[in-house]
Image (cartoon, coloured by chain):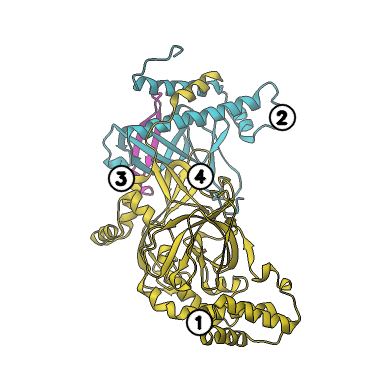
């Protein structure tokens, strides 16, 4: 990986792409997602994106579930349709080589079962799949992946959004859900690390318990600011397992002097387009062109210990807590100076050339800062002195 | 691994060793290729990070402002730095700071040859920040450790059984410099001892 500092199973990602371009092209992301949304792209991927947008504010940083917006609730109505369509697309893909069926055919069957006969979607899916298995003269095993068609993954394998996966792990933490739309939210972990999970109220799923190991089948991955999460949905099968898992830690901890705060730090503007959070360059988004940006705070910094450099990224929350400057205050500072760059200048004057230890997961060549500690105590001079005298 | 151009590490080097490092080189013919200062302990430095006491500032420019800053390290040796119109932030720090003050400096090493053929080493600062004594003490220990690592590496590679593959920068340093690396180990010891004196802790028996 980037600088050899990655301890343990960190996320394997494409380091060649520049950080500013890592925000996915939503369409491409959807296309890339295995088994989802290949066709018909238009209606479906839009629905998916709506679904994601409502939740994106609280994906990053976990427990500050501040912003489940009204939009989320407004969109719950589309979700069932979304799920049906998604499921139909998946089922269709499993049979398209064997049977002459369209996604619409599949969706219609699901729709009849779910909306007319009030069959739970997971059951409806099973039933429809069985029907097609019979028609095609196939066995369930022929579909692979334990029948769901999903890849079974571990936490550290999750490296792309909008993939349907099966995953086994322990609920290591439950956080308070700050929205009625969210039934449960917390951390889910296996040997390779932990990942945030979200369970929607509307999905009507059983309650998960902290410390319990589950097999979750048919969950969807998501990503925000480089952090991945999994979302349980109406079709998710939750199986309680009677086993224990040693939950791994995928965080890294690095320390050194903060030798640079790079451009693109301080008070920045992000693209307001749905599911796009790219940082604007001169009022332009790489994906959406000229847009009216939304103000945000962040710091792209460099920690250097004299042997290695580590690029570190503070999101808005981490930036506010490190600098003591809130977004509102930053905007006021910029207004007074008629210049947004005063915010980064102030941060540089305050932070540069001092020692810090930061902890967090890695994304590409960055450490995403969850915790930061100013190192102000001198280190052990005596031990070094003994070494120096002994050479 | 290094698919993107990697940022240069900021080396930690006491002023005594830094000022002895008069040899610079490039690793490619590209005009924009980074220039490295060869440290006498056998490491290349394209960037340095230091924390010390700013002792003097002076505008030495003719037409436009050109600020010189002198920073002293725990051994009483000085780093010289120069910031002009192309380093506006660093220049304004040197203009505004009142010596004495603890400052941290990130910068690039520069060398220039005087009329009588002597090579002077200085720093072109990228950033200058005022810091506290604890940060300075931490830097002293860190710089002692890094220097010691280099000294040890140098000694191992140039020792008796030194016919194994020698690190190219160690080889280069052995070629370019006459000063024994023992000098720099001695500087490490002095720097660390100065911290102990500061702390007014009873001196160690062997100090």
Nearer the observer, B56 or A194? A194
Judge depth for marks 3 and 4 and give the one in front: 4
Q: Are marks 3 and 1 in contact (CB under 8 Å)?
A: no
Residue corresponding to mark 3: B92
Nearer the observer, A10 or B170? A10
Q: Colour of chain A?
A: yellow
**Chain under label 2?**
B
Judge depth for marks 2 and 4 and give the one in front: 4
From the viewer's perspective, tell me whether residue A233 is left or right of residue B72. Answer: right
- Give the mark, 3 or 2, whose residue is nearer the N terminus: 3
Secondary element type, mark 2: loop
Q: Is residue B14 shown to the viewer in this render? A: no
Judge depth for marks 3 and 1 and give the one in front: 1
From the viewer's perspective, tell me whether residue A323 is left or right of residue A143. Answer: left
From the viewer's perspective, tell me whether residue A102 is left or right of residue B16. Answer: right
**Whole-number angstrom distance, CA of label 3 to CA of label 1:** 61 Å
* Callouts 1 and 4 on one subunit: yes
Q: Is residue B199 shown to the viewer in this render? A: yes
Residue corresponding to mark 2: B164
What crowding class fits label 3: few (fewer than 14 Cα within 10 Å), some (14-19), or many (20 or more)?
A: some
Residue corresponding to mark 4: A309
Which chain has been coloured cyan in this picture?
B
**Whole-number angstrom distance, CA of label 2 to CA of label 4:** 29 Å
Q: Are marks 1 and 2 in contact (CB under 8 Å)?
A: no
């Amino acid at each position: 990986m980037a600088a050899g500092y990655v301890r343990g199973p960190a996320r394997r990602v494409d380091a060649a792409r520049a950080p500013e371009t890592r925000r996915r092209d939503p369409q491409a992301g959807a296309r890339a997602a295995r088994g989802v949304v290949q066709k018909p792209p238009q209606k479906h991927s839009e629905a998916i994106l709506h679904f994601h947008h409502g939740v994106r504010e609280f994906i990053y940083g976990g427990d500050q579930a501040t912003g489940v917006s009204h939009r989320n609730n407004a969109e719950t109505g589309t979700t069932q349709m979304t799920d049906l369509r998604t499921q139909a697309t998946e089922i269709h893909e499993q049979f398209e080589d064997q049977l002459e069926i369209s996604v619409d055919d599949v969706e219609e069957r699901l729709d009849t079962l779910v909306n007319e006969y009030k069959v739970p979607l997971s059951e409806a899916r099973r039933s429809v799949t069985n029907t097609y298995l019979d028609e095609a003269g196939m066995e369930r095993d022929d579909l692979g992946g334990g029948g769901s068609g999903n890849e079974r993954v571990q936490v550290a394998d999750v490296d792309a959004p909008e993939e349907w996966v099966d995953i086994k792990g322990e609920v290591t933490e439950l956080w308070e859900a700050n929205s009625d739309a969210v039934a449960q939210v917390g951390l889910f972990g296996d040997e390779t690390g932990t990942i945030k999970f979200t369970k929607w109220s509307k999905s009507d799923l059983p309650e998960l318990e902290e410390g319990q190991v589950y097999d979750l089948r048919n969950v969807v991955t998501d990503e925000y600011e480089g952090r991945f999460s999994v979302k349980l949905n109406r079709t998710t099968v939750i199986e309680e397992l009677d086993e224990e898992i040693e939950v791994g830690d995928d965080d890294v901890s690095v320390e050194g002097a903060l030798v640079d705060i790079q451009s693109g730090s301080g008070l920045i503007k992000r693209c307001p387009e749905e599911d796009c959070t790219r940082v604007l360059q001169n009022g332009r988004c790489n994906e959406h062109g000229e847009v009216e940006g939304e103000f945000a705070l962040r710091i792209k910094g460099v920690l250097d210990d004299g042997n290695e450099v580590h690029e570190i990224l503070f999101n808005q929350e981490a930036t506010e807590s490190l600098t003591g400057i809130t977004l509102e205050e930053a905007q006021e500072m910029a207004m007074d100076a008629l210049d947004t760059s005063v915010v980064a200048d102030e941060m540089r004057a305050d932070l540069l050339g001092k020692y810090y230890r930061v902890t967090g997961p890695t994304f590409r060549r960055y450490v995403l800062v969850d915790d930061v500690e100013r190192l102000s105590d001198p280190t052990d001079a005596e031990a070094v002195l003994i070494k120096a005298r002994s050479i | 691994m290094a698919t993107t151009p990697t940022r240069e590490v900021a080396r930690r080097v006491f002023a005594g060793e830094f000022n002895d490092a008069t040899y610079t080189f490039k690793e490619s013919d590209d005009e924009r290729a980074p220039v490295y200062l060869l440290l006498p302990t056998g490491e290349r430095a394209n960037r340095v990070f230091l924390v010390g006491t700013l002792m003097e500032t002076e505008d030495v420019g003719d037409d436009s402002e050109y600020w010189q800053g002198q920073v002293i390290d725990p051994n009483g040796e000085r780093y010289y730095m120069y910031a002009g119109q192309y380093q506006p932030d660093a220049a304004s720090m040197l203009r505004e700071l009142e010596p004495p003050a603890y400052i941290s400096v990130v910068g690039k090493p520069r060398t220039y040859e005087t009329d009588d053929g002597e090579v002077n080493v200085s720093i072109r600062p990228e950033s200058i920040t005022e810091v506290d004594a604890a940060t300075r003490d931490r830097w002293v220990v860190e710089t002692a450790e890094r220097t010691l690592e280099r000294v040890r590496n140098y000694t191992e590679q140039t020792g008796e059984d030194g016919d194994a593959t020698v690190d190219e920068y160690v080889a280069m340093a052995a070629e370019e410099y006459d000063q024994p690396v023992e000098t720099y180990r001695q500087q490490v010891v002095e720097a660390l001892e100065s911290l102990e004196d500061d702390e007014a802790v009873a001196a160690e028996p062997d100090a």
